[in-house]
Image (cartoon, grey):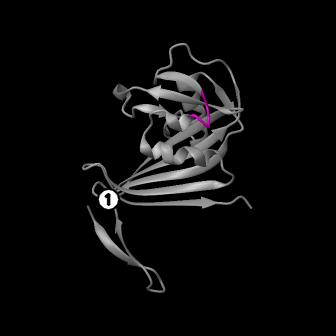
Amino acid sequence: MVWWIRIKPNGSERRLVSANVSYKLYTMCMVQDGDKVLLINRPESKGIPGYIAPGGKVDFPESIVDAAIREVKEETGLQVKDIVFKGLDEFCDPTQSLRYMVFNYLATSFEGELLAQPPEGELLWVHKDEALNLPMQSWFKRRFPLFFRPGTFEYHFLWDKENEVTLAETMKEYEVV
């Protein structure tokens, strides 16, 4: 691993920068139908247990939006339309020079029927005001309300994956102009 210090032109900030950072791109798409949202009850055997919105990896060279649409289709059977960008999550692991980026979307228009045998877990339409009472990962629980607020959001986590510890966390919300 190669590290060096970068100094801004005005000298106000120094940061360690890695020359060999790996990026992993993911999507998440909250599907909303009126007051209800579609969640997947993902079992522990799928890696992230608890209720979560559809999403997954961005395959090269597909666009990030196309990946979000594809993931919803694969996991639920629904074809979402007119998805809206809601925010970005970044999980950075400096011990492995790894940055996970999750592009979050909201879809309120869709076609199709839910899959009878969904591959990622049971599909459930839940009233959005009751969803936070369901078992879900803490990071998804914090992010959930942001899908429904005006504007966009950005979460940035500095995370030690090996020890499963959050080293730093910032969250910003941006208004629509």
Q: Quadrant of the N terminus?
A: bottom left
Q: Quadrant of residue 66?
A: top right
Near-viewer residue (35 or 116) = 35
Q: Residue at x 61, y 34 (%)?
A: 69
Expressed as whole percent of the image width and height from the top left, the position of residue 75 reads 53, 25
Assign a secondary structure to mark 1.
loop
Expressed as whole percent of the image width and height from the top left, the position of residue 54 reads 53, 32
Expressed as whole percent of the image width and height from the top left, the position of residue 127 reads 62, 31
What amino acid is labelled 1 in the image? Pro
What residue is pinned by disc 1?
A: 94
Residue extending farthest to the right is 177
Q: Residue at x 54, y 25 (%)?
A: 74
Magenta stretch contains residue 127: yes
Q: Quadrant of residue 166?
A: bottom left
Q: Is residue 51 above or below residue 152?
A: above
Q: Is residue 128 above or below residue 98?
A: above
Which residue range is magenta in the image?
A: 126-130
Expressed as whole percent of the image width and height from the top left, the position of residue 104 reads 57, 45
Q: Residue at x 54, y 52 (%)?
A: 88
Near-viewer residue (168 or 92) = 168
Q: Quadrant of the C terminus?
A: bottom right
Magenta stretch contains residue 12: no
